[in-house]
Image (cartoon, rainbow, N blue to C red):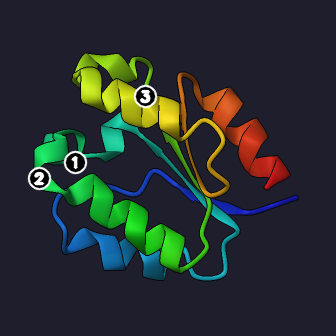
Amino acid sequence: MPQFLDRFPLRTAADIPDLIGAAYGQDAVLLTVDDLAPEFLDLKTGLLGELFQKVTNYRLPLALVLPDADAYGPRFGELALEHRSHPLIRFFADESAARAWLARV
């Protein structure tokens, strides 16, 4: 069974390398909306893009649980749709679906 890091708080860009370090030896990462500071959900800040770049560089699957991605704006909803088939980064409305995907990657 794959092991993954979950419930890691991300408040600033400085937390991203800490997440990567904490995920060392894990197979994947699961984050919920509660783990992310509001700035991560504002695409203008670039923080989510920075997180995506890091997990992609380290080939670390990431499941993001956001019950309503469209609540963060139409561009955010588009981003979630674009990642439906991404091999490393996916958005999910509920945690059980996220865990099921992580068990398969």
Q: Name the disc covering residue 45, or none.
A: 2
Residue 102 sits above or below residue 29 on the image = above
> In the drawing, does residue 55 fall left or right of residue 19?
right
Label 1 environment density (alpha carbons within 10 Å; few <14, some 14–19, many ≥20) = many
Q: Residues within 10 Å of mark 2 (few under 14, many from 20)?
A: few
Q: Residue at x 19, y 74 (%)?
A: 14
Horizontal and vertical percent for residue 104?
84, 49
Q: What kind of residue is marked 1? A: Phe
- In terms of secondary structure, where does tag 1 sit? helix
User: Which SS class for mark 2?
Assistant: helix
Task: Name the residue located 55 percent from the left edge and 79 percent from the top edge.
Answer: 58
User: Residue 90's spot in the image, x, y percent?
Assistant: 57, 43
Residue 10 appears in view: no
| Mark with earlier residue (2, 3) | 2
What residue did someone put label 3 on? 66
Quarter of the picture holding the N terminus:
bottom right
Q: Quadrant of residue 96?
A: top right
Task: Tell me the tag on residue 85.
Answer: none
Q: Amino acid at mark 2?
A: Thr
Q: Amino acid at mark 3?
A: Leu
Mark 2 and 3 residues: CB-CB less than 8 Å, in contact? no
Where is mark 1, residue-wise?
A: 40
Left/right of residue 100 with respect to residue 46 in the rendered view: right
Foreground disc of the pair 2, 3? 2
**In the depicted structure, whether residue 9 falls above or below residue 83:** below
Q: Sequence order check: which comes first, mark 1 or mark 3?
A: 1
